[in-house]
Amino acid sequence: MLLELTVRNLALIKEAHVAFSEGLNVLTGETGAGKSILLDALALALGGRASSDMVRHGAAKAEVEALFEVPTDHPAVRRLAEMGIPADGGHILLRRDVSASGRSVCRINGHLVTLAMLREVGSVLVSLCGQHDQQDLLNPDRHLAWIDAYGGEELERCRAEYEALYARYMRVRAELARMTEDEKALAQRLDLLRFQLSEIEEAALEPGEEERLLAERQKLLHAEKLRTALRGAYAALAGDNRGMDWIGHALAYLEQAAAVDPELERVHEAVQSAYYQLEDAARELRDAQEAVPDDDGRLADVEARLALIAKLKRKYGDTVEAILEYAAKVEEELEAIENREARVEQLARELEEIGRDLGVEAEELSHRRKEAAAKLCAAVEAHLRDLNLEHAKLFAELDTLPDEEGIDVGGRRVRAMPHGVDVVFFTWAPNPGEPPKPLARIASGGELSRLMLALKAVVADAEPYGTLVFDEVDAGVSGRAAQRVAEKLAALAAARQVLCVTHLPQVACMADVHFVVSKAVENGETVTRVEPLSEAGRVEELARMLSGVAVTESSKQHAQEMLRLARGSKTAIG
């Protein structure tokens, strides 16, 4: 249930705080006062469309907060839990800020969220019914949603199974289409892949080869300089000057000295260790000299090999390893293409099997929809009788679209769509003896309003909404029909919260809480106010609605009588 709605700097509303109650909450006021702005504000908080035009002139941003109270097992609480947002004490606070530049910021219980997250939570808290929703009745694309909403858990389960199978069907169908694409393009792709693989295989690359070649190239480029340095170092240690011999002489003298003075043994050991290390180094220098390449042809071979690797890197990858990985992928694709006939046959069989199962699911879904549609129409007709349309008949026509490439459903090839194979549209006959016709061709504004109210009344128990909102659902209705609409709204409000913008005194007098929306000029600014009415205030407002311009004693008496009768009607409703 919606507890509070706070609005700042939205259109003509500078600041408004409205505390709603259980039952029927009615908003009235003169034309142009801004009654629908409050509902626009609520729609914003629920994730509706926003624009900079909504921000009050001169303000930096518009702010809307909607506070709800819900039971702990409500779908909104479960969705918040999935988002990691607690619903403390069963309260959910939705907030939406819209800046003058059009930027929107959304929060739930103080946590920043995306607009999609705000909309997801809002979609299960409130059912909004405005003028555009009545136009949905004229749109066959929306009729299926009404039936599915009424169909219950079994229909929902059946639809979910169909949708999952349809997704598989479309994936396999898309892959099959790719596998059987234009033969010429496929042949060209095959030639390209074979050439690329041949080019890489002929190079006979090895992991780490480029690094080894670069090191060898460095040696070849500076071979003479390296050879001279190694020769000089070796000569200094083991050449004619015999640097090692001098260290050997020193070692012999130190051995004699250590025999006399044991403290010199440490020096003797250090020189001895150095002698052995230098001896090892001399051997390594000799081997290194012999290993220095002196073949000019080898440098040319290395340069050519590195040039080949560079060429392949430009085409297939940044490293030798990347080139080899690319070759492996090419091999896989080649194998897939070359074996595609077998894969095509496999996919075709799989598509046929899934299509057969999909047809079975579609037939069951259609059957359940027809059952739900018949029950929905009967229930709506019962409510229409309460709304002074005693003889109205509503029909839901379900059909399929022929498609030679579609799936088999009951021996016919029909088009498979994401949510089933059914095309649904409502027809009705408001008067006895009339054949059913599409709503757009026969329904007046008042009839559409009552039909929408009847539909909402029927599906209300099947939906999680704790709050129903009607924006002039009584449009085009007067007289006895208006009284019936008022009674139907009161009946709906007996089980849930209802918010209603109305211009009819018959509806307003049934309110549990009555708000008046007024417009005034303050300090050169036009502002809209929303105020709850006392009993005396309700009499005044109802008298205004009854008499028009001037409130008379007669209209006040009439208003008082309407309130008295309304109390009796609500008691009877229960």
Image (tube, helix red, strand yellow):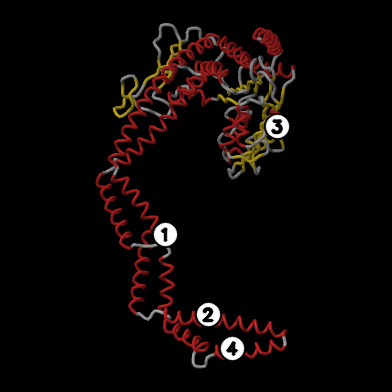
Give the x, y percent position of residue 65. 67, 34
Distance between the alpha carbons at the discs numbered 1 and 4: 51 Å
Give the x, y percent position of residue 565. 68, 8
Q: Earlier in the sequence, mark 1 or mark 4?
A: 4
The residue furthest bottom is: 241
Asked whether 149 or 325 is in front, the reply is 325
Is 418 placed above or below 151 here? Answer: below
The three-letter amino acid code for the residue at tag 3 is: Asp
Mark 1 lies on residue: 321
Give the x, y percent position of residue 233. 50, 86
Distance between the alpha carbons at the discs numbered 2 and 4: 14 Å
Instruction: Examine the rendering and report whether any part of residue 102 can be seen.
Output: yes
Mark 2 lies on residue: 280
Q: How crowded is mark 2: few (under 14 residues within 10 Å), some or many (20 or more)?
A: few
Confirm or deny contact between disc 1 and disc 2 (CB under 8 A): no
Asked whether 409 or 384 is in front, the reply is 409
Distance between the alpha carbons at the discs numbered 3 and 4: 88 Å
Label drawn at residue 88: 3
Confirm or deny contact between disc 3 and disc 4 (CB under 8 A): no
Q: Which of marks 2 and 4 is nearer the N terminus?
A: 4
Instruction: Examine the rendering and report whether any part of residue 422 can be seen.
Output: no
Asked whether 105 or 506 is in front, the reply is 105
Label drawn at residue 247: 4
Q: Which of marks 3 and 4 is nearer the N terminus?
A: 3
Q: Residues within 10 Å of mark 1 (few under 14, many from 20)?
A: some
Q: Regarding mark 1 in the picture, which secondary structure is present there? A: helix
The three-letter amino acid code for the residue at tag 1 is: Glu
